Image (cartoon, rainbow, N blue to C red):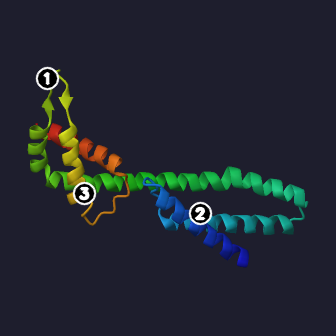
């Protein structure tokens, strides 16, 4: 029991460090804890099953390792993938409603801030700065928890704005 508590504390510490060092870490704490606790339970259940069935200890370790590789990791990976897709869909839906609400102002700023330089190239710097300003002062202050990095959020805002612009033309 003490070993399990130490493993959980260590896992929480690692999780905290990962979240502090990475802007794009989007798995929630409950998912990581579920993965760790289910891993411990899986190992324990495998051990009990093989000990009661009379399997040799060396065969036991191979069976546990193979079952972890071919059963546990794919299931956790699939759950993580499904969660990330769900979260991404939720972000897009919330962000779409925010961009739609402020579309008129964004549209005016878009026309005003993008220009063509003397060499014929379109310059988007001021528009990107406006999107960053919109992100900081409108999007991030909404109730929605956007766990995306600022660059990814900017790309998503521009993508949604472009789609909305095409619909309104």
The vertical placement of 157 against 136, above or below, is above
Query: In this orientation, does residue 1 appear?
Result: no
User: In the image, which is nearer the foreground, mark 2 or mark 1?
Assistant: 1
Query: Residue 82, image x and y in percent?
Result: 47, 53
User: In the image, which is nearer the foreground, mark 2 or mark 3?
Assistant: 3
Which of pointers 3 and 1 lies earlier in the amino acid sequence?
Answer: 1
Which of pointers 2 and 3 lies earlier in the amino acid sequence?
Answer: 2
Q: Mark 2, residues whose alpha carbon is within 10 Å: few (<14), some, or many (≥20)?
A: some
**Dot 2: what SS?**
helix
- Observer-nearest residue: 18 or 146? 18
Query: In this orientation, does residue 161 appear?
Result: yes
Q: Quadrant of the C terminus?
A: top left
- Which disc, if any, is residue 35? 2
Do the CB atoms of the residues marked 2 and 1 lie less than 8 Å apart? no
Extreme residue toward the bottom, this view = 1
Do the CB atoms of the residues marked 2 and 3 lie less than 8 Å apart? no
Which of pointers 2 and 1 lies earlier in the amino acid sequence?
Answer: 2
* Spatial CA span between label 3 and label 1: 32 Å
* Spatial CA span between label 2 and label 3: 33 Å
Left-right relation of 118 to 37: left
Q: How many numbered marks does the figure carry? A: 3
**Dot 3: what SS?**
helix
Q: Mark 1, residues whose alpha carbon is within 10 Å: few (<14), some, or many (≥20)?
A: few
Left-right relation of 143 to 35: left
Q: Which residue is mark 3?
A: 136
**Dot 1: what SS?**
loop
Q: Which residue is mark 1?
A: 118
* Spatial CA span between label 2 and label 1: 57 Å
Extreme residue toward the front, this view = 118
Query: Residue 121, image x and y in percent?
Result: 19, 25
């Amino acid at each position: 029991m003490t070993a399990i508590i130490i493993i959980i504390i260590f896992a929480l510490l690692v999780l905290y460090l990962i979240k502090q060092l990475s802007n794009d870490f989007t798995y929630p704490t409950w998912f990581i804890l579920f993965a760790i606790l289910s891993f411990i339970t899986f190992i324990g259940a495998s051990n009990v099953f093989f000990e009661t069935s009379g399997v040799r200890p060396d065969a036991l370790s191979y069976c546990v390792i193979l079952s972890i590789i071919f059963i546990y990791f794919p299931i956790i990976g699939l759950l993580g993938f499904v969660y990330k897709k769900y979260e991404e869909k939720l972000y897009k839906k919330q962000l779409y409603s925010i961009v739609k609400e402020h579309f008129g102002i964004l549209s005016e700023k878009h026309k005003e801030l993008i220009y063509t330089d003397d060499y014929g190239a379109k310059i988007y710097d001021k528009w990107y700065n406006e999107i960053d300003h919109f992100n900081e002062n409108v999007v991030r202050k909404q109730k929605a928890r956007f766990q995306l990095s600022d660059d990814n959020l900017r790309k998503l805002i521009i993508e949604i704005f472009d789609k909305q612009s095409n619909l309104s033309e």
